[in-house]
Amino acid sequence: MRFVLLAALLTGALAYGQVDPAGEWAPRFHEDQPERIPGPEIGDYCGLPINNAARLRGDAWDASLLTVPEHQCKPHPSDYSPRGPANLRIVKEIDRDTQQVIAYRTHISWEAPERTIWMDGRPHPPAWAAHTWQGFSTGKWEGDMLTITTTHLKIGWIRRNGIPRSDKATVVEHWIRHEKYLTWVVIITDPVYLTEPFIRTTDFVADPDQQMAPYPCEIVVEIQRPKGTIPHHLPGTNPFLTEFADRHKLPHEAARGGAETMYPEYRDKLAGKPVTIATVAAKALPPAPAGDGTLHVAEVQGKVSMLVGAGGNITVQTGANGILMVDAGLAAKVDKVFDAVSGTAPGEPLRYIINTHVHADHVGGNEVLGKKGSTIAGGNVVGDIGGSAAQGATIIAHEEVLNRMSATPAAGQPATPFGALPTDTYVGSEKDMFFNGEGIELLHQPAAHTDGDTIVFFRRSDVVSAGDIFTPERYPIIDLTRGGNVQGVIDGLNLIIDLTIPAEKQEGGTMVIPGHGRICDEADVVEYRDMLTIVRDRFQDMINKGMTLEQVKAAKPTEDYDPLYGDNTRFVEAVYRSLKPSK
């Protein structure tokens, strides 16, 4: 009996040793070496199941973008990092008491990305959680194969020559170990830029004696450019797109990629032979849940949280002095908002409401929430009249917000209730406050989303509340009737980038709460700023050529971004009218 038990234990240990991925690994470059070491050539989209939007983004990409300071220290995302000169370390984290694997942690030599793959069954974060370069990964064993699912990735790349992978992608990986060899299979499903899943493999061999050096990265000014310049090619002007196909004597059509180019039968199609290519149908992602009207409080950092589900995002700062809110949400959500905000600091009074702009999804709760608050006021030196000074929270906004809210309403529109109006306004470019132990800067950005936009910077918590100048999941709404302008939005985004300082790997550090959407950091703002700058340059070029609004619409100047940011109807018209000189 003892012999049988010992044999079983030894057999189990041997089997476990064959599949356990922990250890030191060196990459093998016999697959895709030209793409992985010198890097992919411009215009090489062969074998990629991309749609036209991805293709157009690749056409516009300029390698000089990597010299822009905000782009210099960005690491490869987790779905791309194995492709470089990627010496790999995999470490197990073990629970001391149960001896179960809690997580695998990886370190890759190139750019030194650190990643955690949770093995303890925890769920993926909610939709409003921040995205990172490595994403959020969970793993499970399927026989001898470790299957990993990753969500919450920042926008990355399918191929490092401008072909993007969106932040809505889901990545499934398989680690397969056989003795001293490890095969890493990556399957990317992206509803924005791919028409079907994209699969690639990378091989490693055990190298227990390897040593990995640190990989520090310091941002420097490599090229002097005017502030806000984003290198890119205007549509139809990239002179390098055909060089790859010409050099390798490939048909230009094949170099443009698409799902068909993944399959061997595509050669027969190029030769004019009748052939049916059975591509894999793209699977639509399930629709997002409609929601039950529940509001969610997400901690950001320091003393600041974000309230989700009230219309626009609400920023909440709490401390010994009470509660400060940035924006008030929709009027219909006001009771739930108050309950949620009060729950962040039970027993503490609501002292301040700061309005970032005039729209109802951000100021609708002013009146009711204001009445529930309590202003820090001076002594009651004139009896009951003076005592009333402390009733209600102080509502702060730029004077242009007050001007808009107190103006005579358009025909058929109700007037703004007096109690919803700001009780304290500031003029000019900024207002400083000190509340709950930290400095707070209110920065006016004129002629942006509206003419009364305020960006709020919590200096000690290191959080920026951006309002609707920054909405990472949709195009900005440029309210021309209330003084908005596309250039002002770009200026506002550049101001946010000036305020933010990322931590290591261009991630974290100063966090940004957008007017709508998930918690972000500087890298997310940079992606959005780049998009808007490129779109502005395209529109300006077409306007300079004398094109009308209808001609611009027909040219589809935002086609490469529409799958990512949605309906562009109002956006295209607003950008055109912002840039077109009035007669």
Image: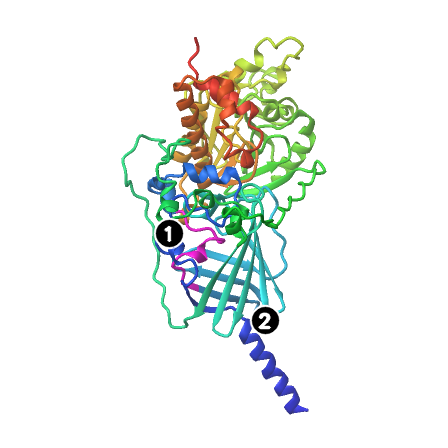
The picture quadrant where one finds residue 314 is top right
Left or right of residue 257: residue 148: right
Look at mark 2 in the image and give the residue it sits on. Answer: 99
User: Closer to the camera, 400 or 35?
Assistant: 35
> Eyeballing the image, is 175 above or below 263?
below
Q: Is residue 76 magenta?
A: yes
Q: Residues within 10 Å of mark 2 (few under 14, many from 20)?
A: few
Q: Is residue 403 visible?
A: yes
Q: Kindly identify which numbered label has been placed on residue 525.
A: none
The overriding secondary structure of the stretch rendered in magenta is loop
> Eyeballing the image, is 381 above or below 175?
above
Could you tell me the amino acid type at mark 1? Gly
Could you tell me the amino acid type at mark 2? Gln
Secondary structure under the numbered disc 1 in the rendered image: loop
Indicate the position of residue 191 as horizontal and vertical percent values: 58, 43
Secondary structure under the numbered disc 2 in the rendered image: loop
Span shown in magenta: 74-88
Left or right of residue 140: residue 211: left
